[in-house]
Amino acid sequence: MPGIPPTTAAAEAAAEAAAATARACGASAAARLAIDRAPSPAHDDDGIPLLDWRGRALDCAACAQADLHATGRCRPGHACVEDRYARRIDRFFQWNPQQANASLGHPYFERRAIAARRADLFRLPALVDDPDETVRLQVALRLPPQQLLRLRADAHREVRIRVAWRLPAKALPSMVDDEDYHVRQIVARRIALPWLPRLARDADSEVRLEVARRIGTAGLLTLRRDPADAVRREVARRLPAGLLHLLLDDADWLVRWETAQRAPHDLLRRLLHDAEAEVRQAALQRLMQPLPGAAAADMGAEDDDGRHQP
């Protein structure tokens, strides 16, 4: 084609040929093209030695995946299920997801955990009691929510955190007393509103802050005396304007500043005498703003000719 350098034209032709091959042959052909572009065994990832999970040198000739290797479905140093390096195991299962079920009982925890990402769902319940939390974490991420009940009391916090995010809301009350604050924090975000007063008494301020973001007015009135400044600031953001006078004397000036953002004008005049300059400035700025509808009233009525009437 005139005007196109030969190298560019050749590259475009090669790209189009590859795309045509993928379209003609389907997903399997596209996967093979991806394999063909993978690094050669001489260039393993990050220079990490090619060792199995026991620290022994890999032997492809004696490998149970020899048939896959012969057809290009695995590659030492890049995609290998026998390697101890997690990224190589993961690539192997990306290329061969149908092999995942067979690795769920392997002694190496990394291999079981990565296989659990792609194994059939009906095989996962057997891994709920796996001795390694990395495997159980993958199970918690993939099991249907209604099947997560057995993992609510898992020994590892990261597993319980995932369970708290995915468990059906009606089952969350069983986790309100979890020993980990982050689990309880997630529960406070998701649990039904009637349970929030219980969590409003939680020992951790981060949990109570989540409660303050959702609880009703009665609960906010209780939390206005919370020892944590951050909780009382959230109360100031959400408490009905008619009750903000209860926060005018709060010990934290940021609570009073938040109050000034929403307080009625009669309260703003009191805040003009606040001990903190930032609070006084916020109150003054609010007082200088016209009341809603005041601007329209100042313009007066117009007669039929569009002129203002006195």
Image (cartoon, rainbow, N blue to C red):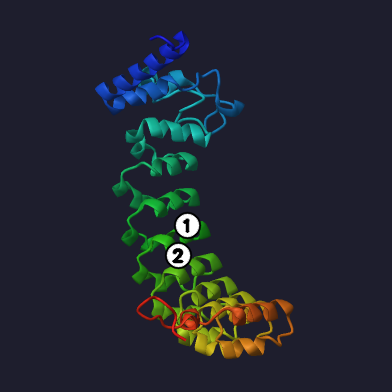
Q: Is residue 230 placed above or below 168 in the rendered structure?
A: below
At 70% from the left and 76% from the top, the residue drawn is: 278
Q: Amino acid at mark 1?
A: Val
Looking at marks 2 and 1 on the same chain, the residue that comes earlier in the sequence is marked by: 2
Say which element carries label 1: helix
Q: Which residue is mark 1?
A: 159
At 58% from the left and 91% from the top, the residue drawn is: 266
Q: Would residue 108 be visible to someone looking at this image?
A: no
Numbered disc in front, either 2 or 1: 1
- For disc 2, the neighbor class at 10 Å (few under 14, some 14 to 19, many from 20) is some
Q: Amino acid at mark 2?
A: Ala
- Could you say which quadrant of the image residue 3 lies in? top left
Q: Is residue 275 left or right of residue 10?
A: right
Q: Nearer the viewer, residue 191 or 290?
A: 290
At 47% from the left and 57% from the top, the residue drawn is: 159
The percent position of residue 279, horizontal first and vertical second, equals 68, 79
The percent position of residue 188, horizontal first and vertical second, equals 47, 72
Q: Which residue is mark 2?
A: 153
Q: Nearer the viewer, residue 91 or 293?
A: 293
Q: Is residue 37 placed above or below 273 in the rendered structure?
A: above
The percent position of residue 12, horizontal first and vertical second, equals 40, 17
Mark 2 to mark 1 CA distance (whole Å):
9 Å
